[in-house]
Amino acid sequence: MDPRLIAAFRQFQRTVTREVGALHGDFLDRGRPLAASRMLWEIGDGDVEIASLRARLGLDSGYASRLLRALEDEGLVEVAPSPTDARARVARRTRAGCEEVVELDRLSDDGARALLAGLDENEQAELAAAARIVTRLLSRRHLEVSLEDPDSPEAQWCVQQYFEELQATFDAGYDPAAALPTASDELAPPHGAFLVVRYHGQPVACGGVKLPEGEPAFLKRMWVAPSVRGLGVGGMLLDSLEARARDAGATFVRLDTNSALEAACRMYEHRGYVQVPDFNGEVHANRWYAKSL
């Protein structure tokens, strides 16, 4: 490897850690280091198994325990036995912890705003583009696409998030009962496939493909969590679903969607899908796409 690449990346690391205050023991003037505040943010809104939290952050058991203990001492986190696994422990934010995360987000936004204010508009755009590229490239190795039972808890959780997002996005809401039915066995081999994408082991995206014999493949329930949008997850998922269809002998793939899902429509069109007439009468759709495989 070219030593200049290594030198450039190390300079990048030194610059970023300094600018974001990662070296300070009092990150954002909140009386704790960045690692503790990051752990508080990573816990999320519900219970999270501590083993999963450690793996997600890449921390050893001892250091993670010290961070959690410090957050407990501040009254920001509670640690308890898992309600579903007696061998595991879970962490959850207290009400004070939830309020602290809101404040951390506000202060972080202020810090980013102050940093960007020292740049002109072209420099701001250049930095934002570079940040997106770095995030996408370094996050890719932590993404995993796997075949999933469409009835598994994680698959069902992803589908529920998808339905809730459609409900919030569509002007008339979204009624799953009014949609064209999709049985679980239609998204399971050999009739189809359902894929889940995990980021640091956590489900963040899903998508299914029906593989009716002698007919075009049909994509269903493509969803990507807002937290990982911009990392190329949608394209990775779409490539994997198309590969499944191609391996099953399909020569065309189709889907229905809605123009309110602007980012999804842009992705489909960018990746070779063309609009076609309504082919299934789906009541929630106003766009239909097809692509030759």
Image (cartoon, grey):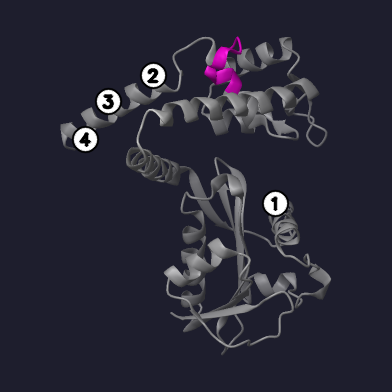
Image-based side of 105 in relation to 115, left or right: right
Q: Earlier in the sequence, mark 1 or mark 4?
A: 4
| Closer to viewer: mark 1 or mark 4 | 4
Label 1: few (<14), some or many (≥20) within 10 Å?
some
Q: Quadrant of the N terminus?
A: top left
Q: CA distance from mark 1 to mark 3?
A: 40 Å
Instruction: Name the image quarter holding residue 88.
Output: top right
Say which element carries label 1. helix
**Mark 4 lies on residue:** 5
Say which element carries label 3. helix
Q: Earlier in the sequence, mark 2 or mark 4?
A: 4
Instruction: Name the image quarter holding residue 28.
Output: top right
Q: CA distance from mark 2 to mark 4?
A: 20 Å
**Mark 2 lies on residue:** 18
Say which element carries label 4. helix
Q: Earlier in the sequence, mark 1 or mark 2?
A: 2
The picture places residue 172, in percent across and down from the top left corner, at 78, 68
Q: Earlier in the sequence, mark 3 or mark 2?
A: 3
The picture places residue 4, in percent across and down from the top left corner, at 17, 32
Main SS of the magenta part reads: helix
**Mark 1 lies on residue:** 154
Q: Which residues are magenta?
A: 28-37
| Closer to viewer: mark 4 or mark 3 | 3
